[in-house]
Image: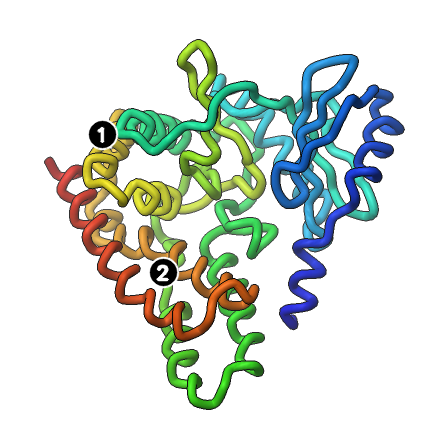
C-alpha cells in the first residue's frame, strides 16, 4: 500500500457538520456545540443531556471491530473497572461508511507525570491485566497503535510499520540508502511477544489517557483497539513514558506489582517491549513527513540507551 493510500484508509474523517447531522438524525439529540479533540474524536455538548465523546473510525476498520470496542467497554463496566462508558445502548452507528462509537465524556483533569500519577497508572494497568476473561466473549487480538493498524496487537503494529517504511523506500535519496536499510532491519527485528502471557490490554496506557475526577478517582479513556495481547508490551510503553525520571519507573512497578509480578522470561525481554513503540513512532513520523531520515537515524542510539536504562531500573524494581 502506498503512503497516500495508507493516509486515505486511516486518516480520512467526516466533517463536524456531518457528525452534527448524523447524531441528531440517529439519536434525536439536540446539540449545543462540537469540539474536535483529536483525529476523528469530538466532544459533543448537548442541550438535553450529558456531553458525549464521538469517535469516527477509519475506512479500513470494519464495523464489527467498532462493535468489539463497545463490547470491551461493556465488559469493563460489568467488571467495575474505571473506564469511560458507552453513552447509549446502541452506541455504534455508521457515517459515510465508517463506524462511529459514542461514549460519555469524562469530566476531570488530565494528569501530569508525577510519581503519584505513575503509581496509580501502574495500579490500574496491573488491575486491567489481572481481569478474569473466562466469563466474557473477548477473543480478538488488541494493543496495536490505531494510527498504524486498525486491529490486532504488536505483530500487526510492527507489520504495518514495516509495510509503511517499505513504501517510503522509493523516495529515499541514494546517499541515504544505507541508513534506510539499517532502520528497516531494526524494525523487522522487533519482538512481537506472541509467546508471552496474554491479558486484556489498552493500546496507549499513558498519562494522556488518564482523567482524574474531583473525588480523587481515576478513569482510563480511549480504548480504541483494546483486546487480548502480551501484557509486557502494554507495560513496556507505560515504562517508556515514565522513563524521564527513575522514580517514576519505580512507581509504575510498585503499582503494577500489587496485582502482577512478571515471570523470568518477561523480565529478560522487557527491554524489547520498552523500545518497540519509540522505534515505531520514529518510523511513522518519517513516513508521514514529520522527520527526516537523517534525524531518525541519529535518534536510534538515544532510544536504545534510554531503553536499557529504563529496563535495568524496572527489572531491579521487580526483583527487589
* 289 vs 218, nearest the viewer: 289
Q: Classify mark 2: helix, strand or loop.
A: loop
Q: Position of residue 92 (x, y in %)?
A: 74, 33
Q: Position of residue 248 (x, y in %)?
A: 25, 35
The residue sitting at 47% across, 66% down in the picture is 291
Foreground label between 2 and 1: 1
Image vertical order of residue 40 relative to residue 168, above or below = above
Mark 2 Cα shell of 10 Å, populated few (<14), some (14-19), many (≥20): some
The residue sitting at 46% across, 36% down in the picture is 208
Image vertical order of residue 215 relative to residue 40, above or below = above
Of label 2 and label 1, which has the lower sequence position?
Answer: 2
Q: Residue furthest right?
A: 25
Q: Which mark is residue 141?
A: none
The residue sitting at 32% across, 66% down in the picture is 300
Q: Quadrant of the C terminus?
A: top left
Q: Quadrant of the N terminus?
A: bottom right
Q: Quadrant of residue 182?
A: bottom left
* 215 vs 77, nearest the viewer: 215
* 119 vs 269, nearest the viewer: 119
Mark 1 Cα shell of 10 Å, populated few (<14), some (14-19), many (≥20): many
* 1 vs 110, nearest the viewer: 110
Image vertical order of residue 38 relative to residue 106, above or below = below
Asked if residue 273 lies left or right of residue 261, the reply is: right
Q: Position of residue 30 (x, y in %)?
A: 83, 20
In three-dimensional space, the C-alpha distance between marks 2 and 1, rounded to whole angstroms, equals 25 Å
Q: Residue furthest left?
A: 320
Asked if residue 230 lies left or right of residue 134, the reply is: left
- Per the image, the residue denoted by label 2 is 191
Q: Quadrant of residue 114?
A: top left
Q: How many tags in the picture?
A: 2
- Per the image, the residue denoted by label 1 is 254
Amino acid at each position: 500500500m502506498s503512503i497516500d493510500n495508507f493516509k486515505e484508509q486511516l486518516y480520512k474523517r467526516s466533517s463536524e457538520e456531518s457528525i452534527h447531522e448524523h447524531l441528531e438524525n440517529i439519536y434525536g439529540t439536540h446539540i449545543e456545540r462540537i469540539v474536535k479533540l483529536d483525529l476523528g474524536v469530538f466532544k459533543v455538548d448537548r442541550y438535553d443531556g450529558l456531553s458525549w465523546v464521538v469517535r469516527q473510525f477509519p475506512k479500513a476498520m470494519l464495523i464489527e471491530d467498532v462493535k468489539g470496542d463497545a463490547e470491551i467497554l461493556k465488559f469493563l463496566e460489568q467488571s467495575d473497572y474505571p473506564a469511560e462508558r458507552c453513552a447509549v445502548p446502541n452506541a455504534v452507528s455508521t457515517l459515510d461508511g465508517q463506524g462511529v462509537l459514542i461514549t460519555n465524556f469524562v469530566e476531570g483533569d488530565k494528569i501530569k507525570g508525577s510519581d503519584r500519577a505513575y503509581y496509580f497508572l501502574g495500579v490500574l494497568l496491573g488491575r486491567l491485566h489481572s481481569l478474569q476473561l473466562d466469563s466474557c466473549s473477548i477473543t480478538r487480538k488488541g494493543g496495536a497503535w490505531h494510527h498504524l493498524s486498525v486491529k490486532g496487537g504488536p505483530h500487526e503494529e510492527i507489520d504495518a510499520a514495516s509495510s509503511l517504511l517499505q513504501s517510503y523506500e522509493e523516495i529515499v535519496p541514494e546517499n541515504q540508502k544505507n541508513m534506510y536499510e539499517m532502520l528497516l532491519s531494526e524494525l523487522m527485528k522487533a519482538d512481537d511477544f506472541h509467546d508471552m502471557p496474554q491479558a486484556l490490554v489498552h493500546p496507549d496506557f499513558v498519562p494522556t489517557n488518564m482523567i482524574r475526577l474531583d473525588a480523587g478517582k481515576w478513569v482510563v479513556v480511549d480504548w480504541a483497539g483494546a483486546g487480548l495481547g502480551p501484557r509486557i508490551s502494554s507495560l513496556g510503553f507505560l515504562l517508556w513514558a515514565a522513563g524521564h525520571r527513575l522514580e517514576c519507573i519505580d512507581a509504575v512497578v510498585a503499582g503494577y506489582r500489587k496485582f502482577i509480578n512478571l515471570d523470568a522470561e518477561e523480565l529478560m525481554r522487557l527491554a524489547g517491549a520498552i523500545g518497540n513503540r519509540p522505534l515505531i513512532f520514529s518510523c511513522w513520523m518519517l513516513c508521514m513527513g514529520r522527520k527526516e531520515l537523517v534525524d531518525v537515524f541519529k535518534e536510534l542510539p538515544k532510544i536504545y540507551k534510554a531503553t536499557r536504562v529504563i529496563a535495568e531500573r524496572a527489572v531491579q524494581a521487580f526483583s527487589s
